[in-house]
Amino acid sequence: MLENIKLEWFSNIRGDLLAGTVVALALIPEAIAFSIIAGVDPKVGLYASFCIAVIIAFVGGRPGMISAATGAMALLMVTLVKEHGLEYLLAATLLTGVIQILAGYIKLGSLMRFVSQSVVTGFVNALAILIFMAQLPELTNVTWHVYAMTLVGLGIIYLFPYIPVIGKSIPSPLVCIVSLTAVAILLGLDIRTVGDMGELPDTLPIFLWPDVPLNLETLMIILPYSVGLAIVGLLESMMTATIVDELTDTPSDKNRECKGQGIANIGAGLMGGMAGCAMIGQSVINVKSGGRGRLSTFTAGALLLVLIVFLGDWLKQIPMAALVAVMIMVSIGTFSWTSIINLKKHPVSTNIVMIATVLVVVATHNLALGVLVGVLLSALFFANKIGRIMYVKSKLSEEGTRVYQVVGQVFFASSEQFIKSFDFKEVVEKVVIDLSQAHFWDITAVATLDKVVIKFKRDGAEVEVVGMSEATETIVDKFGVHNDPNEVEKLMAGH
């Protein structure tokens, strides 16, 4: 226990503290922007980011991952806030947390194994594009100073690590933010700053129970939003956890992460914050800045609150160009450039899944919808591929018995091919169907076997089914009717 705490919290103290500082600074404009999207006061997003990051540091299943208020969640809140107000949003946030905790207990996090690598790649590439597109408003209709500051910022981010000794000791995004802020203040540049994004809160958050009627009507109002928020939040969190797993080459507990996200959202709702989830952009910043443990996530949340409440006057002077440079670095680092090279190497179906995921996410800004489309396409391509592998070999014995040997997987996608593999016009006294190299997966496959057996029996042949594995025998015995004389008679009479 103590060894695990030491490993997750104190094995990388300096790296986690510095990385958390970078993330805290980058969280501020995003939390304000997401609050504006949702139609609430900036402090709602900032308080949420503080609460979620601090709580998830203790209860999350993926050390080093950053969770806070996010754009994907904010988009789902717009209608609720517009029609019913902030109090109902807070109530929906609490219910979202409860649903996510339940999802953790029924182990929904394990469903991530059904998400193929091509969907993950598409998700990552789509987020990289969205992160870059989100920076374009800051680079549109601005003076040349903004472009110059952004280019200098990118230069610092990519070149600073090559400086001997200190280059590897201090995260280059932090150097970028501090340097450009100092330059902007010294030169008195008239460019957009964090202070122009919205008013920063100057007080600590307080415990706040949503002022809504505790009745069925309230539940019916918030339930659809809470379910949507819970699904999108868990999906984005699970996908981000998978990506951080790959970046750090360490495992994570997805079911614990589900519960942790729920607890964090309940905490945010009770502190006047909106629902949130894991943030791939900030998580990548954290990892690339040297953050690995829970201390980096805690530092990001705690320092965020300290900065906005106690150092707000300084914070307001950070030029947006510095943060834009950091986010462009994130989008470049997030995008899987090898996926473009691999388009020639990978199967067409894999490329279609990846590209479809990207297009749907970018077109709708709905991460859940994009992943859903990707998973469905992956399942269809997989079913089609496995279905085509199934085949039936046939031979006529010296005794005049026709033996059919089925090889492969028999299920809904291969059932039609299964029926076509038998010659019902051939006149034989006995037919043997050998299933020793086949596996029956569903009731469609069982129903198909029934049809084949009954067709042969209807034509006067004796049919024997042999070689069933234990699993196949179980499903055939449960749902099959070809061994039931009464059922066979009924079906034969119906023809």
Image (cartoon, rainbow, N blue to C red):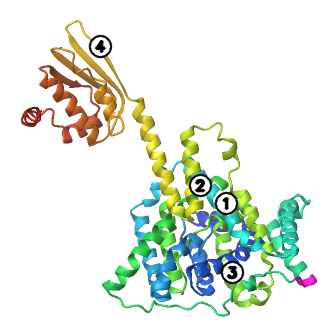
Is residue 251 shown to the viewer in this render? no
Q: Going by the image, does 300 lie left or right of 40?
A: right
First in sequence, mark 1 or 4: give its number.
Answer: 1
The quarter of the displayed image where residue 416 is located: top left
Q: Earlier in the sequence, mark 3 or mark 1?
A: 1
| Residue at 63 percent of width and 82 percent of height | 46
The segment highlighted magenta reads 185-189
Residue at the spot of label 2: 358
* Residue at which label 4 appears: 395
For the residues bearing labels 1 and 2, Cβ distance under 8 angstroms = yes
Of discs 1 and 4, which sits in the foreground? 1
Q: What is the three-letter code of the residue carrying label 3?
A: Leu
> At which x and y percent is residue 159?
88, 60
- Looking at the image, is mark 1 or mark 2 earlier in the sequence? 1
Q: Main secondary structure of the magenta part?
A: helix
- Tell me the element at label 3: helix
State the CA–CA distance, disc 2 to disc 3: 32 Å
Taking the image as shown, residue 12 lies to the left or right of residue 151, namely left
301 or 397, nearer to the observer: 397
Q: CA distance from mark 4 to mark 2?
A: 49 Å
Q: Residues within 10 Å of mark 3 (few under 14, many from 20)?
A: many
Is 31 one of the magenta-colored residues? no
Residue corresponding to mark 3: 304
Towards the viewer: 464 or 469: 464
Q: What type is the residue that disc 1 sits on?
A: Ile
Type of amino acid under label 4: Lys
Separation of marks 1 and 4 at Cα, in angstroms: 57 Å
Indicate the amino acid at tag 2. Answer: Val
269 relative position to 45: left or right: left
**What SS does tag 4 mark?**
strand
- What residue is drawn where x is 40% and y is 74%? 224
Circle number at residue 129:
1
